[in-house]
Image (cartoon, helix red, strand yellow):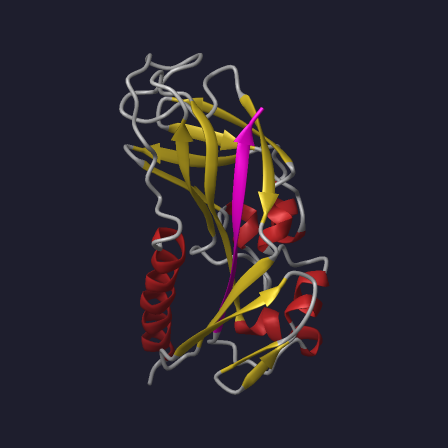
Amino acid sequence: MQSSSWARILRVAIAALSLTVLLGADCPLAIDTGQGGNGGGAGGVGDALDIGGGAGAVWQVETGDKLLVTLVTADGRSESAQVEVGRGDVTLLGRTIGVADLCWRPEIACPQHVLAKATAIRQDASAVQLTYNPRGPLAQLGGKALAGQLSGKELLVPLGVGNASIGICGLLSTSAIGGTAFSAGADGTATAMSGRVAVTYGGTCVAMSGAAAMSADDVLQISAAFDAVRQ
């Protein structure tokens, strides 16, 4: 099969995988709507909750202690397993992946590295900006905030963009933050959020330093859940 065909298979497989991870039953990308203002301060923005407003808001973030690791091979096969953060290996499709060793590498950003415990979010209509930890490929962005989109009821913050997507260990385009925001009142101001952070790397990057025996056309995605409370 031609390499372009392999690439098409991988794009379809990993795109479906990312939708499953980010839109799964435990973490839909829905944001409860509220009747609020039209931006700037507290209150909903259009038909979506206010998760930051023009003045910005700080969210206290806790990332889960388990990682969901999924391998998609060049022929479209896939398998997933969970592993605790900071320990253990997983065996997927007969290949052992040292997840802790992989996440230790300075050129890698695993899900638990992306969001700081105190994450600032600003919102201007459908545009959202949030602060992040400049680790691994994210350090190549050079800015202080990631740009995302709040479209109707969906929040999506791409990670595999710009300089973060360049190089052997660049983040693939299916790397993203997705979440669900919740309001405790009727003014459309979000007070809590839950979601997932997913990062995707190519096989050549993962295979470096012996983390796993993978081909260049394999793809590995790692995701973790997070919960956040508005301060």
Confirm whether the magenta stretch covers residue 220.
yes
- Prevalent SS, magenta region: strand
For image coordinates 36% across by 33% down, the residue present is 150
Residue at x 56% of width, y 58% of height: 170
Q: Position of residue 152 (x, y in %)?
A: 28, 32
| 224, above or below 146, in the image | below
User: Relative to the observer, which residue lies in front, 26 or 195?
Assistant: 26
Q: Which residues are magenta?
A: 219-231
Where residue 44 sits, quadrant-wise, is top left
> x and y percent of residue 85 in the render?
65, 60
- Residue at x 43%, y 76% (from the top left corner): 79
Quarter placement of the N terminus: bottom left
State the residue at coordinates (57%, 53%). Answer: 111
Residue 108 is inside the magenta segment: no
- Which residue occupies the foreground of this view, 160 or 117? 117
Residue 5 percent location from the top left of the image: 32, 76
| Residue 197 to residue 98: above or below | above
Where residue 210 appears, as percent x and y from the top left, is 69, 79
Where, quadrant-wise, is the C terminus in this rendering? top right
> With 210 as the anchor, is 62 left or right in this view?
left
Position of 110 with respect to 20 (left or right) is: right
Residue 184 higher or lower than 194, as above or below = above
**Res 106 quadrant in image:** bottom right
| Most foreground residue, 57 or 133 | 57
Please state the total of marks drawn on the protein image.
Answer: 0
